[in-house]
Amino acid sequence: MASLTARFGPGLGGTILLLVGLWLIGMVLAPNLMMLDFSLRPNLMPNQIGTDADRYTLANFIALFSDSVHRAIFFKTVWASALVTLTTLVVTYPLAFWLAKIATPRGMALALVALIIPFWINEVLRTLAWYILLAFNGPLNAVLLGLGIIAEPVRWFGDFGVLAGMVYAYILFMLFPIYNSISTLETAQIEAARNLGASTVRIHRRIVIPHAKAGIATGCVFTFMLAAGSYVAPALLGSPGSRWFTEIIYNWFFEGGNWNRGAAYALVLLVLCMLVVLAALRVFRVNLADVAK
Amino acid sequence: MTMALEAPVAARLNTPKGGLATIAELLPRIIFAIYMILFFTYLFLPLAVMTAATFNTSKFPTVTPWLGTTLQWFEALWADQAMWKALRLSVLIGICVIAIALPIGTAAALFLTSLEGRARTFFYAVMVSPLLTPGVAIGIATLILWRQAGVGGGLWLIILAQSSFIAAYVMLMVIARLQRFDRTLEEAAIGLGASRWMVFRRILLPYLKPSLLAAMLIAFLQSFENYNTTLFVRGTETPLTVFIATKVRTGLTPAVNALGLILIVLTIVAAVALELSKRSRAAKPA
């Protein structure tokens, strides 16, 4: 703190402190603390606030895990997000390796442009594109029917639609961190291993993946968080059987009218994501500075 | 050690390459080529279908069946007052988010560089945490806090909620450049009698300019495409992403595809322009 004013003088140093304080306290800490407070109180009529009924309770959290439907949707969201993360990792890893180690500068530039175009249009439009493609009377069914691969149109909306749309939406969040970390690996190490007779699988398992673990951890953390917190893809590409936890939260706020319970559910989602971050940091033995690059 | 390395190398180089070995060598290449084709098909098929559906007369956006080629959906989009209103709102929000997130993110980066050791690690973690928080939770927390102060969802809360995590992106981009800053430049200027403010304005800010411009662009794009956070704090406002998502329920026509297509084209133009300006800057002598 002292070095801040020493470097920038009291006026500018004070302004910097003020801005950081406004952000961290006013826009990050206070909202989250208020959400925590809210989640621990019952949903009351305005005239009951401050009365005996207005006291801290865990009822909102207990409600989530005692309601079998909500509990099932919560756990399904967790494992489906993990599945999205794993699928995205498998789908992007070979390309990340190719970009970092094999591609010619020209091929790489071309691939990067091709990758960035779908990414720059927003998530809602990307999901909309899948909505059109997977529609019951849509082009995918028409083509598959025409080729005789399927005998009847398939209802893609549901678990499949959500998985396809989410992996699509988060490809770059997985690809770029892995690409970045693989590109810092000395190519000579791979060549040496190959010359010593290591198989491709062994080279990746023993050299490339350990080297890229920070990038893999970053990609996985971001993808999981985005998937678990996604609202558009399940809303557009899902079916009643593939409801997502965020949809339940939304309903508490704008249909059920119980903000306190909604706050508790949102907090559970938040804690889940934080636990995943901490677990990833621990498992991959990386620190947050590597993750947020 | 050298001997041990050389022997297998020599052995490998001397292996006569028979037809069988070539197939074994080709197979991974073929598999990889198939993978690349599948990957880029996956990447572009939805976009291609969405684009093609823009030109189909069909009222619901699709390419099967093809009912005739038309440009009517661009006209429909142009005439859609609600779309223009949503677009104007999204641009306004984006500009306001830049105005809030850019100073905060820059200040946060400067603040971090003045810290060391554990304090730095701690504040870094706190500042990065909004990026690891699901967007819906950010929106909900902001909504709840401001309801206590009597402020409901709307323009103001959208801007605040978005800025709270977009500032973190700005911080990361500024700090990446700040780490390569030569502090002796500041000391030299002070030694020559410059004021602290002068040093900041004439040395540090110009040095940070490229990263600040890039951060502005990223901040705007993040704001423009945000949906999850905005959904909870929007009140009765309808920014562009909400407008598009609502259309799916209230009557989707290819006019929305036309909008998507225009955004794709703008993206390509912007990406090419950015690349060209980078090259021309690189070509100039420093």
Image (spheres, coloured by chain):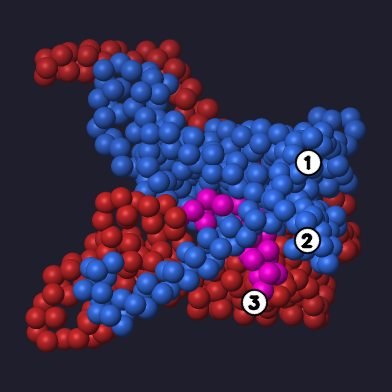
Question: Which secondary structure, mark 3?
Answer: helix
In the image, the chain rendered in red is B
Q: What is the residue that sits farthest to the front in this orientation?
A: A52
What residue sits right under mark 1 in the picture? A63
Q: Nearer the viewer, residue B122 or B274?
A: B122
Quarter of the image with the N terminus of chain B in it = top left
Question: Which secondary structure, mark 1?
Answer: helix
Q: Residue at x 57, y 60 (%)?
A: A120
> Relative to A92, does residue B54 appear above or below in the rendering?
below
What residue sits right under mark 3 in the picture? B156
The residue range painted magenta reads B128-149
Q: Residue at x 63, y 53 (%)?
A: A36
Q: Residue at x 43, y 33 (%)?
A: A282
Amino acid beneath label 3? Trp
What is the CA distance from the residue labelled 1 to the residue labelled 3?
A: 33 Å
Nearer the camera: disc 1 or disc 3:
1
| Colour in which chain A is drawn | blue
